């Protein structure tokens, strides 16, 4: 029986996602996309994004969502970091409202728990993606897919 997962990375005002269908050991990309937060009134833009993601998850039978969590860096947090965190919260709430079991996972956690390499090494490895996915995805969205794939081992 197949399962639909979505891996999501929020950065600034953009939500990047890869929707995968998992059937046994085969991961098939269904869709990959970027949604940008609407300009103008921020609460209205958040509401619109929430509706869009909720509808996508519900209409596409997405049962699991994995979202890249915030991480503490060496640099001082900026306003853009805070705005990304706000949008990440909206996205997490929307995936749950759409019927998906939702996890926030830090990239460093993937590096410690998935395979024997760092997450960035998997992201840049073309052979890994040829072996793991039934069809190619854009290199810019591999991190989204890795988030989802990292949860299959649990």
Image (cartoon, rainbow, N blue to C red):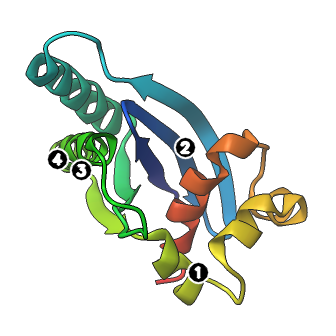
What x and y, as percent, mark residue 108? 50, 77
Contact (CB < 8 A) between labels 4 and 3? yes
- Tell me the distance, in whole angstroms, between the alpha carbons under discs 2 and 4: 18 Å
User: Quick one: label 1 or label 4, which is nearer the N terminus?
Assistant: 4
Q: Secondary structure at mark 3?
A: helix
91 relative to 40, above or below: below
- Quadrant in which residue 30 is drawn: top right
Residue displayed at 35% across by 70% down = 72
Asked if residue 1 shows in the view, the reply is no
Query: How crowded is the residue under tag 2: few (<14 C-alpha within 10 Å), some, or many (20+)?
Result: many
- Residue 18 image label: 2
In this view, the residue farthest toward the left is 43
Residue displayed at 67% across by 49% down = 28
Contact (CB < 8 A) between labels 1 and 3? no
Residue under circle 4?
93
User: Quick one: label 1 or label 2, which is nearer the N terminus?
Assistant: 2
- Tell me the distance, in whole angstroms, between the alpha carbons under discs 1 and 3: 22 Å
User: Quick one: label 2 or label 4, which is nearer the N terminus?
Assistant: 2
Residue under circle 3?
92
Contact (CB < 8 A) between labels 2 and 4? no
Residue under circle 1?
111
- Residue 4 image label: none
Residue displayed at 29% across by 15% down = 38
- Tell me the distance, in whole angstroms, between the alpha carbons under discs 1 and 2: 19 Å
Q: Secondary structure at mark 4?
A: helix
Query: How crowded is the residue under tag 1: few (<14 C-alpha within 10 Å), some, or many (20+)?
Result: some
What x and y, as percent, mark residue 125? 83, 64
- Tell me the distance, in whole angstroms, between the alpha carbons under discs 1 and 4: 26 Å
Residues 6 and 39: in front is: 39
Question: For the residues carrying marks 1 and 4, which lies nearer the camera in this image?
Answer: 1
């Amino acid at each position: 029986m197949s399962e639909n997962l979505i891996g999501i990375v929020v950065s600034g005002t953009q939500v990047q996602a890869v929707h995968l269908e998992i059937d046994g050991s085969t991961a098939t990309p269904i869709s990959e996309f970027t949604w940008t937060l609407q300009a103008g009134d921020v609460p209205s833009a958040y509401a619109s994004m929430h509706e869009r993601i909720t509808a996508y998850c519900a209409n596409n039978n997405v049962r699991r969502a994995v979202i890249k969590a915030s991480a503490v860096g060496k640099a001082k947090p900026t306003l853009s970091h805070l705005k990304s965190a706000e949008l990440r919260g909206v996205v997490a709430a929307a995936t749950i409202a759409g019927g998906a079991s939702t996890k926030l996972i830090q990239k460093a956690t993937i590096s410690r728990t998935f395979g024997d390499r760092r997450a960035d090494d998997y992201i840049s490895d073309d052979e890994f993606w040829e072996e793991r996915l039934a069809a190619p995805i854009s290199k810019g969205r591999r991190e989204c897919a890795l988030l989802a794939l990292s949860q299959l081992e649990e």
